[in-house]
Amino acid sequence: MFCPNCGTSLPEESAFCPNCGFDLKKGTAPPAQPWQPNVQQSAPPQYGYYLPVKSELLAVILGFFIPGAGHIYVGKLVRGLIFMIAYFSLSIISVWVVWNQIGGLVNTSDPDEIMNALSGSMGIIMLMSIITFIIWIVQLIDVYMLTKKYNEGLQRTGQAPW
């Protein structure tokens, strides 16, 4: 037996077509429903290629060890490079300040002069350390939120959101 509506092969005792919903006893099709997108869709798209979800844990671990690397993993290259450049530039400047202070103290034997030089540079180093720590924390939170947003967009549409 075949469905008169869609032509699907059916068992003889069927009352409805499992493919189109045609009522075989009454000879009527079910009422048409308007198409609505499935927001909770978790299957890959029918056409094209399947993009895997990104691991939130891996993104945070990458950002933990190399600030900005998690953003690059998620696909935000420019944002990742901005975080990398900001973080490592401030770190290099801090090391440079310390190095210059150590080099300047080698030729000095006066304890008061040593303390004055160290107290001035310590303020700069502390400020830069606080700023780099804030950049590090912000980029960790940002990469976690971006990864969640990426995965939700991917599951909803089947395409990367950016």
Image: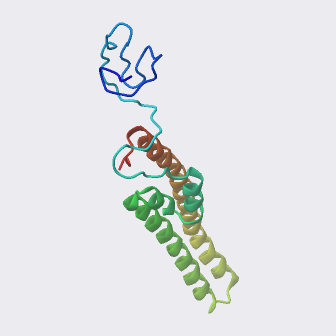
- The residue positioned 39% from the left and 8% from the top of the image is 25
Lateral position of residue 42 relative to residue 33, left or right: right
Question: In the image, is residue 61 above or below residue 39?
Answer: below
- The residue positioned 31% from the left and 10% from the top of the image is 28
89 or 51, nearer to the observer: 51
116 or 90, nearer to the observer: 90
Question: In the image, is residue 13 above or below residue 159?
Answer: above
Tell which residue pokes out farthest to the top in this image. Answer: 26
48 or 2, nearer to the observer: 2
* Number of marks: 0
111 or 149, nearer to the observer: 149
Residue 47 locus on image (x, y percent): 34, 46
Lateral position of residue 77 relative to residue 112, left or right: left
Residue 72 locus on image (x, y percent): 45, 61
| Colouring scheme, one of rainbow, by chain, secondary structure, one colour | rainbow
Residue 84 locus on image (x, y percent): 47, 66
Quadrant of the image occupied by residue 83: bottom left
- The residue positioned 40% from the left and 57% from the top of the image is 76
Lateral position of residue 133 relative to residue 25, left or right: right
Image quarter of the N terminus: top left
Tell which residue pokes out farthest to the bottom in this image. Answer: 107
Residue 48 locus on image (x, y percent): 34, 50
Question: In the image, is residue 57 above or below residue 101?
Answer: above
Quadrant of the image occupied by residue 10: top left
